[in-house]
Each structure stands twice: as structure tokens, then as C-alpha cells.
Amino acid sequence: MALIGTIIGAMSAGIPGQKWGGRETLRLLAVFYVLSALGCAFAWNWYVLLAARFIGGLGIGGSSVLGPVYIAELAPAKLRGRLVGLFQINIVIGILLAYFSNYCIARMGLGAAEWRWQFGVAALPAVLFLVMLFGIPPSSRWLVTQNRVGEARSVLQLMGAENPEAELSEIVDSIHLERLQTSEPLFAWKYRLPIFLAISIGMFNQLSGINAILYYLNDIFAAAGFSKVSGDLQAVAVGSMNLVATLLAMTVIDKLGRKTLLLIGSVGTAGCLAGVSGVFFTESHQSYLLWLLVAYIAFFAISQGAVIWVYISEVFPNRVRAKGQALGSSSHWIMNAIIAYTFPQLAKSSGAYPFVLFSAMMVVQFFVVLFFYPETKGVTLEQMQHRLGIE
């Protein structure tokens, strides 16, 4: 239910995001997070639990679209990769804290109420998120689309723009204010390349197997013969590597570039996944499984994990950026749901089959990125619009 809500939230977030702005819409989504956590914790029947999970999914899908867009629209070009990357850092910190939280709560002897605590504890970061959203400015680019140019200038000055007037002029020119009286459709021929880039990077992100592995990590360790306790601890180890590698990626994403990191990650994840499939095919060398998964997480985090939200937020022009972000995020979450539901079925006969598929997809990704993906590092959002042939 959470994944279904996530897909719907990702597909629909662009509409309120463009109408009311990212800041206001994120505040609404933060309320969804709070309601979801408390609804799960106090659910008095199965249907209330499902509804609470669905509401949480709406928040996840919507914020995965609007968060990166908001950051990209405020960030200077030279820092945009690292600043949008902070979004991904928060995701992996959350994953690590979730693993550790579940590990701690499971050892508190709460009995039948254990799962309620594991869901309910999420209300704490949700409330913090909501409170902090009241300390941020609206996007300067969104303000320009609303003809609130004076406010946009103030925001640019607040954010420390080197030349606020020049940047404001560039934003105004790129948005074409006279054309924003009506909403421009996303699915137009001139946007074919950004659409392809957004859909493909969203799909490949999940075809790497990342969320299938994170969702079923304890089951993967159990299938390889590890105990529940050791599986829980190794999940924390994998989550820790995810965080460390993501932090590393943030230091190099604006130096090496998005495309280079994707190519490195494709090779590394394909090799690690092939190794994992070998462990399950041979039913031996289980001691290597943890190290292969840790290495896989490292390669993923410095490539797809760090790049996806940055890249999607960069390839669309201002007037359809929120819609484009919604498209890429929807591609990501739809593929996430498909893989999450099919992974156990594929793994039934042999745990190796899913990892063979994931490895092959990373090989395909390498060549797609090599031949079709433009580099976006150090390029302003307005310059990228011209590079992609969009006027």
C-alpha cells in the first residue's frame, strides 16, 4: 500500500507543486508523514493500517519529486550537485536509522506491540521535518512563474547569489513569462530527450536491484544461512556503507560529473551482483556475501544513488521541471513496486536468478549512459535548456 501511494504521490505532485510552490506542498506532505506514522501505531484494524501506509506513500512520492526540484531551483550551478545530493544523504541516513531502530526495538521485549513501535517512531522525524519547513523561503524560480519578481530578487539575495540581477534576468528570460498564462504540456516532441533521460534513469535505478535488496536484506542473509541476529547486524553494516559511500559521492559529484559516476557505478554494481548470483548458484562461499553486498552498496551509492535526483532535476526547463521530476520519480517508483512484488517469486526456485537479471541490466545501463546521457556538471539550468535543443 505504501508503494501504491508513493506512485500516485509521485505522479500527481507536480500539479500542486507548480500551483502552490514546492515549499507549501512539502508542508502538506509533512503532515501526511505524521498522520501515517501515528495511524500505523494506533491502527485498530487492518484497513486503518492500510490507509495509514497509503497516506505515508503519498508523502514519500510527493517529496521525492518536489524536494530535489526545490533544492535545484535555489542552488547555484557550481554547488547544485552537492546540495541536491543532500536529499539522497538524508534518505540513506533514514535507511540506516530505520535498520538500527528496528534492531533496538526488536530487543526491547515489546511482544505483540513491537511492530506498532517500529512504525510509530517515524512520527519523530516527521514532526521535525514539518517544523523545519517553516524556516525556508519559496523558490525564486517559482516566484518568477507567478510574476512575483521582486520577491524572487529578495530570495536570490538571501541565498547569496553573486549577481542577483543577472541571475534574475536569466531566469525571467528562460521561463518566458508571456507563455506561462497557460500550463505547457510535458509530452511535447521538443522534450523527447529529457523525457527519455528521466524515465530511463528512474527505471535503471531500480533495475539495479537496490530496493529489492534493501527491502529483503534480512531474508537474503537468511537464505544464505545466517541467523536472524547476525542478519540484523549485517543490515546495519550495509546501511552504514550506504551512508559512507553517499557522503563520498557528494564530494566528487561536481568534480567527476554525473555521467562519469553512472559509468563507474554500472561496472561496479554489475560485477558485485554477478558475484552474489554466483554465491547462490554454487550454494557456497557464503562468507563473501556480506562483502559483495557492501561493495555493491558502495558502487550504487556513489553512482545511481547520488545522481538520480540531481540529474532529473537538471534536464528539464523551468516551465515543466516539476512535471518532469514527477515523470522521472514515477518511473522510479513504478519500477520499484514491480521489482519489490516480483523479487520473492523470482527467488523462489533459485536465489541467483534476480541477481543475474540485475547484473545484466547494469551492463545495459552502461551503454545507454555512454551513448545517450549528456554531462550536466557546472551547467546552469538555463544553459542546459539550450544544450538539449529546447527553446
Image (cartoon, helix red, strand yellow):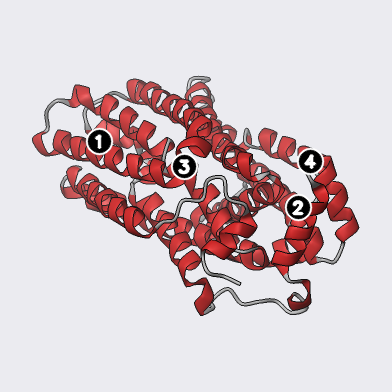
Find the distance from the CA under tag 2 to the CA under tag 3: 23 Å
* Residue 100: % across, % down: 50, 25
Question: Label 3: how many residues lie within 10 Å, few (<14), some (14-19) or many (20+)?
Answer: some
* Residue 142: % across, % down: 76, 59
* Residue 85: % across, % down: 56, 39
Q: Residue at x 85, y 66 (%)?
A: 147
In the image, is residue 76 above or below residue 93?
below
Q: Sequence-wise, which precedes: disc 2 or disc 4?
A: 4
Find the distance from the CA under tag 1 to the CA under tag 3: 23 Å
Residue projecting furthest to the right: 150
Q: Which residue is mark 4?
A: 159
Quadrant of res 61: bottom right
In the image, is residue 106 above or below residue 324?
above
Question: Label 2: how many residues lie within 10 Å, few (<14), some (14-19) or many (20+)?
Answer: some
* Residue 49: % across, % down: 57, 50
Q: Sequence-wise, which precedes: disc 3 or disc 4?
A: 4
Q: Which residue is mark 1?
A: 272
Q: Which residue is mark 3?
A: 257
Q: Which residue is mark 2?
A: 167
